[in-house]
Image (cartoon, rainbow, N blue to C red):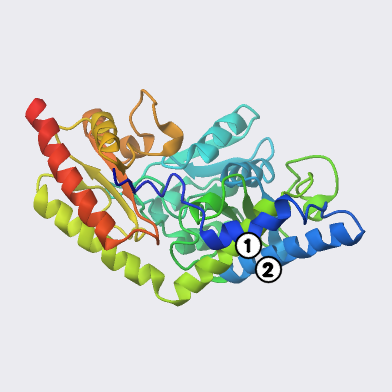
Amino acid sequence: MRRIYLDNNATTPVLPAVVDAMHPFWAERFGNASAVHSHGRAARSAVDDAREDLAALLNARASDITLTSGGTESDNHALFGILAPGQHLITTAIEHHAVLHAAQALEKQDIDVTYLHPNDQGLITPDSVRQAFRPNTTLVSVMLANNETGVLQPIQAIGILAHRRGALLHTDAVQAIGKIPVDLRELGADLVSISGHKMHAPQGIGALWTRKAVPLRPFHIGGPHERQRRAGTENVPGIVALGEAARQATLWIENDGPAKLTKLHASFETELLRRLPTSIIHGSGAPRLPNTTSIRFPGVDSEALVIALDLKGLAISGGSACTSGAVEPSHVLLAQGLSDTAARETVRISLSRLTTADDLKAALDLLDQTVHHLRSLA
């Protein structure tokens, strides 16, 4: 059976070039990057090169990048490393749970939190952010691209508002980096979370970019690694993989990869709506990532659809991978104003730069057949 993978917002396959780059660091190049002998210096050089490659993708300074275990750690570090009791955080109801659950934990530490809701297209408006400011607002945390709908938030405008009020801006850019050009010199954020496995590196590696002079407290306590911001022996194979994935993403972007993916994705959505005209794409009126479709098939249970398609060789998702199997419907879709029923009839389809037109043609056939079949059983 041919298998088609369209759940790339959950995780992406590791590129062959990335596997090749990291492979030597599992065995013959095994040195600890903190050691001063030749083995350690070789590892340190590889870590430094990877950091430079990631910085080049982001148009950032390598020295401002702290290497982490992934997006969740980066999100947690940004919030816990800035906020203190008596301060105020503005975030949104559509954030990844790495931010939402961190914010809920901070509330128990005498930190006030405001959760903004999006409009019906999934957008957080700058005006809603403006109205939420208080004299003690210290940090605003708004994701760059939503992991379920792909909707892109107006981070530049929100950053201007935050800075005018003396607050910092954090953005979870996990779903955006490697899929669209992201220039941190222009974005306007002060802290940016990054994850390797959303951009064809392995799971378990990520980064937190912090603008120079931002007073970020350490999140891990121990040795003086990562300029004393993140203690712990460096995951050299993972870091090398992240650097190579960043280098590959830079090349892909320079060769018009996002534009080509946008065209492929738009053609897929057009044909999907032609075949299943009662379907509804969430956030279709807002700027979105060029790979993400959050679509409702009225009358079809999303869990049943995901399972039926998997049995036929097509992998999609009922929403965020972190909530797969959850009893509750998507918090993102509920916050956007959907009913419980509508949220439970929604699936997420997410492409990658490796997705082909043939993959999508086969996926369209399977979706068409399976949706009609499940409706006939209702």
Which residue occupies the foreground of this view, 135 or 90?
Answer: 90
The quarter of the displayed image where residue 255 is located: bottom left
For disc 1, the neighbor class at 10 Å (few under 14, some 14 to 19, many from 20) is many
Badge 2 marks a residue whose secondary structure is: helix
> Percent x, y for residue 316?
32, 42
Q: Residue furthest bottom?
A: 255
For the point 55% across and 31% down, the residue is: 104
Q: Nearer the viewer, mark 1 or mark 2?
A: 1
How many callouts does the rendering have?
2
Q: Which residue in the structure is indicated by mark 2?
A: 52
- Answer yes or no: is residue 230 visible: yes
Tell me if 257 is positioned left or right of 108 in this view.
left
Tell me if 357 is positioned left or right of 177 in this view.
left
Q: Which residue in the structure is indicated by mark 1?
A: 243
The quarter of the displayed image where residue 378 is located: top left
Q: Is residue 378 above or below residue 156?
A: above
Residue type at mark 2 is Glu
Which residue occupies the foreground of this view, 290 or 12?
Answer: 12
> Percent x, y for residue 29?
77, 56
Tell me if 327 is positioned left or right of 242 in this view.
left
Residue type at mark 1 is Gly
Which residue occupies the foreground of this view, 120 or 192?
Answer: 192
> Percent x, y for residue 295?
24, 45
Which residue occupies the foreground of this view, 182 or 301?
Answer: 301
Label 1–label 2 contact, CB within 8 A: yes
